[in-house]
Image (cartoon, helix red, strand yellow):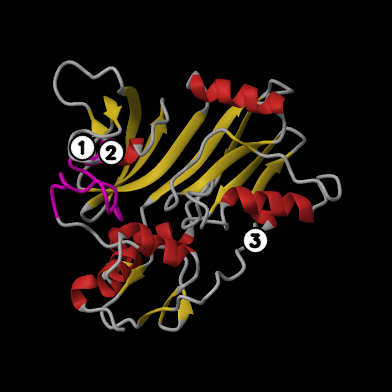
Amino acid sequence: MPAPPELEGPLDRAVRALFGTSWGKARAWIAAGKVSVGGQVVLDATARVRAGDEIAFDEGARRPRGGELRDEDVLHVDAQVVVVAKPAGVSTIPYDDSETDTLDSRVRAWLERRRLVPRGARPSLGVVHRIDKETSGLVVFTRTWLAKQSLTGQFRRHTVHRRYFAIAHGAVISRTLRSVLMEDRGDGLRGSARGRAAPVQGREAVTHVECLEALDGATLIACRLETGRTHQIRIHLSETGHPLVGERVYTRKCLGTLLPAPRLMLHAAELGFVHPVTEAQVRWEQGMPADMVEVLGRLRGGG
């Protein structure tokens, strides 16, 4: 059925409203390949739909074969670690049993194709951090117990170098944002603890924000993580009144009109750590993907 104007936006919201189902079921249907837009199966619950788009649900449909990791997406691989570039729209690891096409599954398949594991053996892959589904950029997986112990310790001690590019609403200034983050700040959302006494279940979060370029209604920024809490950059920017462009959750304190974007404008551009065996400082960088460059050009007045 066609999407009415009031349902322009993320696909999961349109499916929930059109078919009278829950958020969880709408997202599960999309992940399972049962929802199509304009005759094409769409697997990303955050994909944007426009008024008039024909949205169909087929209970008997099966999820199409997942994408493959391209060779150019693997920035480094050795016996201990593999560093890859995650595209937006792919989860780092499965959210639930219905999600089978994830970054970790793609990395395992790539290692098998490249014959970097013994024939018939399942590639060993350790998860030491993750980035949001809508976020693009660099992720490291470990391949041995030694590497996992080493990287887990480095992330815990906050010695891993992580720098993100982001586009945020409004005029953002360079500053350090520091707060105690809670899973529920009192309104059902993650956020900073309120009041002078931080609850014991909260965790300190520190984000160093650098203004890179003033845009039309927004700012290109770089964020260096001192800690790595869930949704840390998104929450910190939102709570200062400057939510990221493309943000759908943390928008309540936005100081102006929300700008359109195909997804969350956040990219993990730099990743560095001490190699678990050589003990050398290693670092990788990846430029912004095309969809982010396009939004940046539009906000520069280029389109």
Q: Is residue 202 visible?
A: yes
Q: Is residue 163 magenta?
A: no
Whether the residues at callouts 2 and 1 have beta carbons within 8 Å, the answer is yes
- Residue type at mark 1? Glu
- Residue type at mark 2? Ile
Q: Which residues lie in the magenta part?
A: 236-256
Give the distance between the C-alpha atoms of the residues marked 3 and 1, in whole angstroms: 37 Å
- Which residue is located at x 18 percent, y 72 percent? 6
Between 173 and 89, the residue placed more toward the observer is 89
* The disc label shown at residue 18, or none: none
Q: Is residue 239 magenta?
A: yes
- Which residue is located at x 25 percent, y 34 percent? 184
**Mark 3 or 1, nearer chain start:** 3
User: Quarter-wise, where is residue 187 in the image?
Assistant: top left
Give the distance between the C-alpha atoms of the residues marked 2 and 1, in whole angstroms: 6 Å
Label 2 sits on a secondary structure element that is: helix
**Figure check: 214 above or below 71:** above
Q: Could you say where residue 182 lies in the image, as x and y percent from the top left?
A: 28, 29
Q: Which residue is mark 2?
A: 235
Q: Could you say where residue 95 lies in the image, as x and y percent from the top left?
A: 47, 49
Name the side, left or right, on which 115 lies relative to 108. Answer: right
**Mark 2 or 3, nearer chain start:** 3
Q: Which residue is mark 3?
A: 68
Label 3 sits on a secondary structure element that is: loop
Q: Could you say where residue 246 lies in the image, as x and y percent from the top left?
A: 31, 56
- Which residue is located at x 20 percent, y 57 percent? 258
Between 256 and 149, the residue placed more toward the observer is 149
Between 40 and 136, the residue placed more toward the observer is 40
Q: Residues within 10 Å of mark 2 (few under 14, many from 20)?
A: many
Name the side, left or right, on which 113 lies relative to 249. Answer: right
Name the side, left or right, on which 268 lies relative to 77. Answer: left
